[in-house]
Image (cartoon, rainbow, N blue to C red):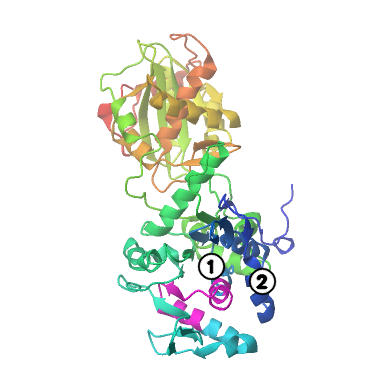
Amino acid sequence: MLLESPLELLGSQTPTHQLVAPDVDFSDVAAVLDIADGLGIELDEYQHDHLTHGLGRRFTDSGSRWAAYEVAIELARQNGKSVIFELRALAGLFVFREELIVYSAHKGETAMQAYNRMVGYVTSDPELRREVWKMPAANGKEAIILKTPRPGKQDDFIQVLKFRTRTAGGGRGLTGDCVIIDEVQDATDDHLAALMPALAARSMTGDPQIWYGGSAGNRKSTVLGRLVTRTEKELERRAKGQPAAERRLVMTRFAADLDVDDPADPRVWAKVNPAYNRRISPDYIQTEYTAMNAALDPTRFAAERLGVGDYPRTEGEDWVIPRRRFEAAEDLKSTTVGAVAFAVEVRMDRSATSISAAGFRQDGRKHLEAIDEDEGVTWAVTELVRLTTKHDNIGVAIDPGGPANVLIGPLRNAGVPMIMLKTADVTTAWGKLYDGFMGDQPNIRHRGGLVLTAAVAAAQTRPLQGSVTLKRATPENSSSLIAAAWAAHALDLAAKPAGVSRVGSPNADRAAAAQRRRPRQGGFDPRSSQF
């Protein structure tokens, strides 16, 4: 099938991830639309939708309040986040009559640009300009102040929009109604701690909100990383039909999934850049792709243009298999009886390959092991020949829809028996593995070891066809756990009693390979393996 021409594509207006507040009776977005119309600003569909959800209100005994306390958006640069913030600030000032709005940015240049744009808007609209007392531009004092005197005090004006560069102390002592945190990927916990009291003081008598926005973050992006984690967990809860836990968080994300999205595909560029072919030209993104050498290493391009973040674990965040459960299942003397299942998994960028095994123990529980993990891919063929020749086994589980499919041909040529997983197996395998650790009587044991433990600590999950499975494109290598999940599931797929072997037909090459154990050069811990 021919790909659509980049010139025929338009940026998608549908977020890849969207979390909305469940308790909304109506939206105050009309106020923003009136200001946008007056200023000649035409909103993109996604901007309109994000503002609609962010300005949703719920009825209370005393009137109405914002349904969302936190409103966040994450997408690549030059897609129009700033317009959302500017209209929210202007509506807060001129329509919602909020007393203090703080617009904060990580860089002074960004804060100044926001100040200059909003001054330009106000100056261009006579109705807005008539309400303004002054717009000081002194360094660190940038603000838009309305002619709204405090009762009984003619020269004490109470409606102010302030622009601030973030510092650890910038924001302390401010009592406000709305805080906007631009460039949230650079915000730290110290910054947030300095700004949040500005809202806390209004939480009883006022109706505060905090708006975040930025592009994909990195390992220092603790604030944005926590928002992403909370959003993903809440979306998983709701997909399972569970009651909402995050009732006052709204988040819109445009982020590629490198487990399924090709960074070189213009359709992916359009999917996560709503301004694609509207305000961002396809040629410009192609230039970015080339300049960042993305054909060899797409990491930087994926972060800058495709919204693929690399976030730290938040303090107290547990492993995908809770650490206490994983550690409780460790048995240094655990071993298998009868035939085992092997499995192989390859990193999305093919930088490393992992081989794991699963088998049944004498007591009927499943036993997991990380056998080998090393750089590159092709070495795995020789190692799997050795393993399947030397040990009773039911074959090598492999996901033909994943990056390990590059091994299918060489393994078939070498006579290695394989178990081809289907899409349903990919989600089922993870669910059964998780349940095996979490049940009232856990039925999985392992020998621990550095490789498997590190894989569990690094692993993340992602939604797939209404369910959840392990994510391949993780910052650290979690492939050994993925392979272990495949191997454990393959035992059930085989439906053969322990001890029944499906070893491939030996030949001279296989017999020779069986005698050569490849030198370990990766992160392998030889104390953890019986193979």
Where's residue 100, x and y in %?
45, 75
The answer to whether 123 is drawn above or below residue 173 in the figure is below
Counting residues from the N terminus, which is met first, the one under dot 1 or under dot 2?
Answer: 2
Alpha-carbon span between mark 1 and mark 2 = 23 Å
Q: Residues within 10 Å of mark 1 (few under 14, many from 20)?
A: some
In the rendered image of this protein, does residue 381 appear above or below residue 220? above
Identity of the residue drawn at 30% across and 72% down: 169
Q: In the image, is 122 to the left or to the right of 447?
A: right
Identity of the residue drawn at 38% across and 46% down: 476
The quadrant of the picture occupied by the C terminus is: top left
For the residues carrying marks 1 and 2, which lies nearer the camera in this image?
A: 2
For this rendering, which residue is in front, 528 or 214? 214
Q: Secondary structure at mark 1?
A: loop
Residue 384 horizontal/vertical position (percent): 44, 26
At 36% from the left edge and 64% from the top edge, which residue is drawn?
192
Residue 414 image position (x, y, % from top left):
51, 25
Q: Which residue is mark 2?
A: 33
Instruction: Say if 503 sits above or below 422 in the image.
Output: above
Amino acid type shown at disc 2: Leu
Q: Is there any visible trace of residue 343 in the rendered image?
A: no
Q: For residue 103: magenta?
A: yes
Q: Which residue is mark 1?
A: 77
Q: What span is colored magenta in the figure? A: 87-115
Residue 412 visible (yes or no): yes
Residue 311's tag is none
Q: Are discs 1 and 2 less than 8 Å apart at CB?
A: no
Q: Quadrant of residue 80?
A: bottom right
